[in-house]
Amino acid sequence: MSIENNKDNNSSNKNKRWLYTILNLDKRIVYICIFLAIALPFFLNPVVDIKSTKWVKSSYDLVEEAAQKRKPILIGFDYDPATLAELQPMAMAIIRHAFSKNVKVVGINFLLNGTSLAADTLEKVAKEYDKKYGEDYVFFGFLPQISVVLLNFGEDFRKSYKKDYYGKDLNEIPMLKGLQNFDDFHAVFCLSGTGLPSTYIVYGVDRFKFNYIAGVTAVSAADYYPYLQSGQMKGLLGGMKAAAEYEGLLGKISDGMRGMASQSWGHITIIAFIIIGNILFYVKKRYEDEDKEKKL
Amino acid sequence: MLFLKKTVPFLITLGMGIFTFMYYFMPHKMMKIIWEDVSDWAIIIGGGAMAVGAISMIRTYYRKSLNKDDPNRWYSLITLICTIGMTLIGFITGIGGESLFNDLFINVMIPLESTMFSLLAFYIASAAFRSFRLKSFSAGLLLVAAIIVMLAQIPLGENINENIPAISSWIMDCPNVAARRAILMGISIGSVATALKIILGIDKSVFSGAGK
């Protein structure tokens, strides 16, 4: 009897040792797992079978409407290198869509670190579609004091912007003839991982009533749903998945779709960690309860 | 001296606060004329504030880099060298598309900042394993909601079950909006109260000399 008890105790102790080893797993092993889950899928084929959600489709439709009405769109490139991975594919997809339908694009920027990124993005996509600066697209560059600039934009953007990013007088740019304020743009996009999309609503949408779409990181997308319900936002692009959905609607494989495999495996790994962590937590709890019973 | 440090900034804040408030709700022609000058000044002051920030940063890091007792002084020195180096390169080569300044920004700054932000994935994975526990009913709700929303954010979600995106959409549209609205209202009321306290001079801690 005592030999059997000893055997049981030994196996139970062995299990406990295993349990505590896994529970106290070195952080670096977790880090290696997530690194491999994100890095290896870059060598896989891009995920192309992506259904578009309601708010991405409505954003896409607004650019289509702009093409039909022959009105330009305004894009706020308010992201910096930190959120580049999620927001750059979105920006490229929107510009590609606009240029493919001959919709003119005006770019603005309120985040200093993103100014040259925005200029480069516009230039890169313009080359793909053989679009000319000043005729098909313009970039106004960076200005501080977003609230003041947006209030002025509602009246006449020339009040704040005298010259473009390259130092050219706005009155000498042919594309801008006949453009004055938000009313002349069919849709206004703000792509940002900061709180700037809300500022567009407070100082722009509420007062001047225009079609507004925010492109944000997946982490901050939840913050903007109240504005969709209230009708202050007509569309929402949340994270890389939205960029991939937009690319799906465009029918062009690019960074959004390429990043989907990595994002998928990253999410699966995190979900697996949550499940494993909880199973171990319950086993540990059971062992602790058993120990308490034995002591009693 | 106190008059210049406290009273004058307060009077400017009071005047501009009331004027901006009135302009937002009463865009009268006369107000628009004044607003044009005021908005130019606001942008100029915004640019000036950046210069003040840069000078303040250089002074702070200069002092830190001279402190021989501080083992981290080399980091301060690197910051200073990078700041001054980039400024000089910007002045010499310009900041256009094909300048050295832009090349450095694209090839150094972007990978550095992206790397910093990507560390988030590692912390989330570690936290998911160690801390995301089903300890109570509300923790369970959070856990289930998180898994559904995470699955909906990847194409695999709709392959596992067609309803996952719809459930995620409901979570975002209903419970999320209800909670966010409550938070937004709280923040907005707090912001209005804070703004009024500053405009009316009840809270003078924001003016010069605060905390000294």
Image (cartoon, coloured by chain):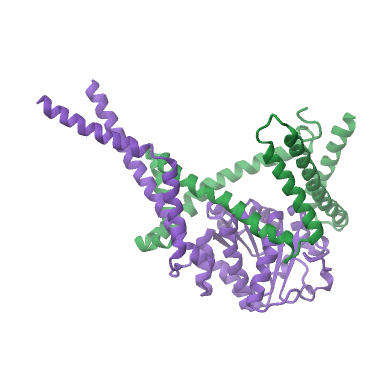
Residue drawn at point x = 52 percent, y = 74 percent: A252
Residue A264 appears left or right of A83: left
> Which of the 4 image quarters holds residue A68?
bottom right
Residue A216 spot, x, y in % from top left: 58, 57
Q: Residue furthest front?
A: B68
> Which of the 4 image quarters holds residue A167?
bottom right
Which quarter of the figure is the N terminus of chain A placed in?
A: top left
Residue B209 spot, x, y in % from top left: 81, 31
Residue A189 appears left or right of A44: right
Residue drawn at point x = 27 percent, y = 29 percent: A289
Relative height, residue B62 to residue A263 (above, below)? above
Work out whether residue A164 can be spotted: yes
Q: Residue furthest top?
A: A296
Looking at the rendered structure, the number of numbered marks drawn on it comes to 0
Residue B40 appears left or right of B159: right
Relative height, residue B206 to residue A117 (above, below)? above
Which quarter of the figure is the C terminus of chain A placed in?
A: top left
Residue drawn at point x = 80 percent, y = 52 percent: B23
Work out whether residue A223 can be spotted: no
Residue A195 spot, x, y in % from top left: 64, 51
Decide which of A240, A152 is in the foreground and name it.
Answer: A240
For chain A, what colour was chosen? purple
Relative height, residue A258 to residue A146 (above, below)? below
Residue A286 spot, x, y in % from top left: 27, 33
